[in-house]
Image: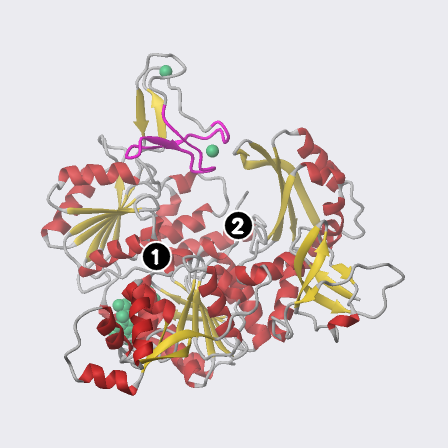
Amino acid sequence: MLSVALPLPLPQAFDYRWPEALGAPPSPGCRVRVPFGRGQAVGVVVTVGTGEGGRALKPVTALIDAEPLFDDELWRSLRWAASYYHHPLGEVLSAALPAVLRTGAPVPDLDRPGLEITADGVAALAAGGLRPGPGRALLERLQSGPLPLERLREELGESARGAGNRLLRRGWLRACRVPLAHDPAPRVEAPVASPEQARVLAALAAADPRRAHLLEGVTGSGKTEIYLALAAQALARGRQVLVLVPEIGLTPLALRRYRERLPAPVLALHSGLSDRERAHAWALARGGLPCVVLGTRSAVFTPLPRAGLIVVDEEHDASYKQGDGFRYHARDLALVRGRALGVPVLLGSATPALETLALAASRRLGHLRLAARAGGARPPSVELVDLRAGHHPDGLSNRALAAIGEALERGEQALVFRNRRGWSPVLACATCGWKADCPGCDRPMTWHRGPGLLVCHHCGRRQRPPGACPSCGGGALDPRGIGTERLAAALAARWPDRQVLRIDRDSSAGAGRLDGLLQAVERGGPAILVGTQLLAKGHDWPMLTQVVVVDADGGLYSADFRAPERLAQLLTQVAGRAGRGARPGRVLVQTRLPEHPFWRTWLAGGYAAVAQAQLEERRRCALPPFRFQALLAAEATATAPLTAFFAAVRALPVADADGVERIGPLPAPMPRRAGHHRLQLVLEADRRAPLHALLAAWMARIPTLPAARKVRWSLDVDPQDAG
Ligand code: ADP
Ligand code: ZN
Ligand code: ZN
């Protein structure tokens, strides 16, 4: 008998009979094809038992893998994750696999068909006299070594195929298998470590190699240099390195930096790859290739049979938490895997998450610091601008406009930050005050003037605006408030002969285009950048000296207890873009609440002071990280099924739930989204054990409740969003 985990939202595994005709039964961790419902499904063997317990079981249809897909450590870590997040193992295993393997395709080979040049080919090329054309281009490209067919077609176009066949017949080329790896990039030497960097490296060398550390270093302090140095050491020992970066941190620029510095393949794992490329990278890592895997959230599931180091860059970044389905936190799983693998984990950030700071304070993490910027750059000066005085039609004070103008005069760059896309967050009637709200979300839709559309940033609904006010029939519709589109237009009108680059998700659809924009900035001509938090992270622009934060007051009004932490992180990261080169940086923050205590703390003590104050506040109010939370949420098009669902959940018998507080069900912070009503129940406890005992009991029962079938429900353990 085999019990098989299927990618279904059900807690249990499914039992099947192993037909003897298929040979010896497989090990746990192998994929099998099994009958399910009226069709077939691909699942992973969890346990192998004897006998059928008197039941008539359906037989397994086929065995897919002769060897388990997951090595011992990954298997244990994934099973741990399934139980910690109370998520069905089948879905966890499925999330951990590249998409092509979920559908039952074989693990890809570790090499691909390619071409190499023969001695005759080299001689023909050396003799000169070859006419320019696809044939010659192909021979020249292959001079430095064999390349996969795919890569040649990518670089040289479809004509490479015909030319390749001709040259194969001539004996100038030969078919071969090419290991999947990148072209060796030109090597760039590492800079000499600063005294601070040397101290951090020495401390890490002396530490228990299995201990995890927080590396808290101001923006531009040289954290990436520390990652590179440690990665080089691990690679020199023949080990693998996993580097996790935030979703928008994995730019071609960042990739190039790792490639040109490290003498090993750097495999990028991100959403821009094709499924086949992802599966290849996964298979190479699983094969034990000494390499760097540089990836976003889901790269935390990469097999690392020869692991040597795990780095989580910008560990505070919200993109490490999966927002739907299997809601894991990649930083937390990186720590779990590091422990299981017995390798060091380094969490790096200029603005560490309060959870991470609390772990460091309790000494469960080592705490290392880089206080100064590398290469002698000084921290930027920060100043508030009181927006209450004067009139600012385009959201920019005279003070800010003057500062931008001065930066441009000096031949430098300015960054104007506003975390709202579009022209204006609200379109309203000038006569009666009617607002264009999303009918599904009851929230204002954002006016995007370029495409002439109202867009709901919560559910994605897009529609043309009405010609006149639908409420009073007569009024003209006015844009209210400022988005990046409007800012960019205002700045371009004021400085028509300067480059104004808008960088947000609307302007940079397509990562290639974003990279082009960023490289233009890196080259350094005077320019104004306007953008959202896409601009806040990771970039290193030496000519950027002036930062203007247009309006961040929203973060001071928010009811979410994490809002001050997030605001301080965002502002500190944005401010950190200024003055990373030789010239000093300046930051102006516009606000209508200059007396708010947040500003005093941040201006006087920076992120560390805000974090300290917030930690004290969280402790006083018994909030995470001093208390553990889980969020049971449900949504439906009507409210009756929601109340029925939560009533059924609360009626479930629970043996031991002492010390678990149940708050709600209450409407979610967004009570309606995309036409669905949303209700949630918050569970809180001072210790994890009783909370998880309650969750385990509930999760065994909730999927079978009839009331659960009439709603969309989800469980979020350690939620990062208030819902
Ligand atoms: P972080 O990751 O902390 O933001 P980086 O590692 O990107 O910092 O370093 C910021 C800038 O300083 C980069 O341009 C980097 O090349 C440079 N840098 C870092 N360390 C050194 C060093 N020891 N000597 C000279 N330049 C350095
Ligand atoms: Zn009106
Ligand atoms: Zn909506």
Q: Is residue 370 above or below residue 656?
A: below
Residue labelled with disc 2: 323
Element under disc 2: loop
Queried on whether the Cβ of the residue with tag 2 lies below 8 angstroms from ligand 3, the answer reads: no
Magenta span contains residue 672: no
Spot the residue most to the front. Answer: 169
Give the amino acid type for the residue marked by disc 2 in the picture.
Gly
**Observer-nearest of 29 and 592:** 29
Q: Which residues are magenta?
A: 439-465
The image shows residue 608 at horizontal and vertical percentages of 40, 59
Colour style of the rendered protein structure = secondary structure
Horizontal and vertical percent for residue 660?
Answer: 70, 49
Q: Which residue is under mark 1?
A: 537
- Asked whether 463 falls inside the magenta stretch, the response is yes
Mark-to-mark CA distance, 1 and 2: 20 Å
Along the horizontal axis of the image, is 243 left or right of 410? right
* Badge 1 amino acid: Lys
Q: Mark 1 Cα within 10 Å, few/some/many (few <14, many 20+)?
A: some
Image point 14% across, 38% down: which residue? 494
Residue 220 seen anywhere in this rendered image of the structure: no
